[in-house]
Image (cartoon, rainbow, N blue to C red):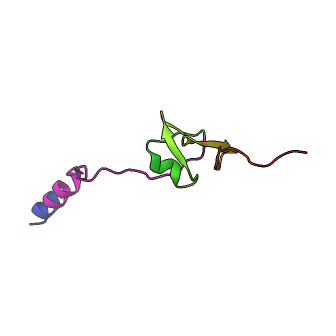
């Protein structure tokens, strides 16, 4: 009887554990600043307003210019005059 019990314990303990991949694909959501890599407009717009993902790099949308790496400002006509 003891022999059968030891054989059973050895067989169960020696069995390799098999893990199967999950049915969900893990992904990471992140935000980027101007000039850094992105995969979609969502990556850029989270931190920098008026930005988009262009060829894998965060850039300002048309009509906006970068001001540092955290801001896109409107590039419209400046109506101030210099004296």
- How many numbered marks have been drawn onto this rendered protein structure? 0
| Quarter the N terminus occupies | bottom left
- Give the side of residue 23 with respect to residue 59, left or right: left
- Depth check: give the residue in front, 50 or 9: 50
Relative height, residue 79 to residue 54 (above, below) = below
What secondary structure do most residues of the magenta stretch adopt?
Answer: loop
Extreme top residue here? 55
- Depth check: give the residue in front, 26 or 61: 61
- Give the side of residue 10 with respect to residue 70, left or right: left
The image shows residue 50 at horizontal and vertical percentages of 55, 50
Span highlighted in magenta in the image: 8-34
Is residue 40 magenta-colored?
Answer: no
Is residue 13 magenta-colored?
Answer: yes
Q: Residue at left 73%, top 46%?
A: 78
The image shows residue 42 at horizontal and vertical percentages of 46, 50
Q: Residue at left 10%, top 61%?
A: 4
Q: Residue at left 22%, top 56%?
A: 13
The image shows residue 15 at horizontal and vertical percentages of 19, 51
The image shows residue 62 at horizontal and vertical percentages of 54, 40
| Quarter the C terminus occupies | top right
Extreme right residue here? 83
- Depth check: give the residue in front, 78 or 24: 78
- Depth check: give the residue in front, 60 or 70: 60
Relative height, residue 31 to residue 65 (above, below) = below
């Amino acid at each position: 009887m003891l022999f059968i019990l030891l054989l059973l314990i050895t067989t169960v303990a020696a069995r390799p554990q098999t893990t199967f991949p999950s049915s969900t694909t893990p992904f990471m959501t992140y935000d980027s600043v101007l000039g850094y890599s992105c995969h979609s407009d969502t990556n850029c717009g989270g931190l920098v307003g008026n930005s988009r993902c262009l060829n894998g790099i965060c850039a300002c949308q048309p009509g906006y210019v970068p001001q540092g790496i955290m801001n896109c400002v409107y590039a419209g006509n400046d109506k101030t005059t210099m004296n």
